[in-house]
Image (cartoon, rainbow, N blue to C red):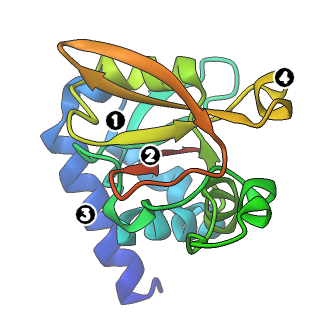
Amino acid sequence: MRAQPTDNLLHTLKRRFETHMPRHEGIAWAEVQVRLEQQPAALQSLRRMEDSGGEPDVIGRDPATGQFSFCDCAAESPAGRRSLCYDRDALDARKEHKPQGSAVDAAAAMGIELLTESQYRYLQTLGEFDTKTSSWVLTPPPVRALGGALFCDRRYGQVFVYHNGAQSYYAARGFRGWLRV
């Protein structure tokens, strides 16, 4: 028998799934639920996404593997994952006014991945996200090797990708996660 917290999470995910059907046309909730119930680690990751304000939802299915893709679909970058620098190296490089952590470390602890720029752009085809905030995205190694990191947002009806020093952090910048189940 499942624990009550799992039932509550599945109810929340189902309600969100049914409310936002255009995000996952052609996918039935029953298929998603069966897969989730078979993967307790994925449910734990989704719980962490939910608890930090991400509002995860199904946004696709890989035709080759059958895996469902969940992504943070909160209107703004998840409130519980802001004010973080990009990665551990950036955090260690800060001499003062260190943030609580890094986006890469937080994602790993949650069992999720940062969105790539292309995943972020795909998410933006499903709605308007980060119109007041911004989100770190997975940064290509050559950019990171030079001390930079990438983030994205939506302004003026367009999706923009920017760069910043990886050690920077802002109250309005967080990260969005991606999980395959």
Numbered disc 3: secondary structure: helix
Dot 3 or dot 1: first in sequence order is 3
Dot 3 or dot 2: first in sequence order is 3
Rendered residue at 44%/46% (across/down): 32
Rendered residue at 78%/33% (across/down): 144
Query: In the rendered view, would you say 125 is above or below 32?
Result: above
Q: Do callouts 1 and 2 mark residues in contact (Cβ within 8 Å)?
A: yes
Question: Hey, which quadrant is residue 149 in on the image?
Answer: top right
Q: Do callouts 4 and 2 mark residues in contact (Cβ within 8 Å)?
A: no
Q: Do callouts 3 and 2 mark residues in contact (Cβ within 8 Å)?
A: no
According to the picture, the residue beneath numbered tag 2 turns out to be 32
Disc number placed over residue 54 in the picture, else none = none
According to the picture, the residue beneath numbered tag 4 turns out to be 142
Question: Hey, which quadrant is residue 159 in on the image?
Answer: top left
Dot 4 or dot 3: first in sequence order is 3
Rendered residue at 23%/21% (across/down): 155
Rendered residue at 48%/20% (across/down): 161
Residue type, label 3: Thr
Q: Position of residue 156 (x, y in %)?
A: 18, 14
Dot 4 or dot 1: first in sequence order is 1
The label nearer to you, 4 versus 3, is 4
Mark 3 surroundings within 10 Å by alpha-carbon count, few (fewer than 14), some (14 through 19), many (20 or more)? some
Q: Is residue 128 left or right of residue 77?
A: left
According to the picture, the residue beneath numbered tag 3 turns out to be 12
How far apart in space, not on screen, are marks 4 and 3 (Cα)? Answer: 40 Å
According to the picture, the residue beneath numbered tag 1 turns out to be 28
How far apart in space, not on screen, are marks 3 and 1 (Cα)? Answer: 16 Å
Residue type, label 4: Pro
Q: Nearer the viewer, residue 57 or 31?
A: 57
Mark 1 surroundings within 10 Å by alpha-carbon count, few (fewer than 14), some (14 through 19), many (20 or more)? few
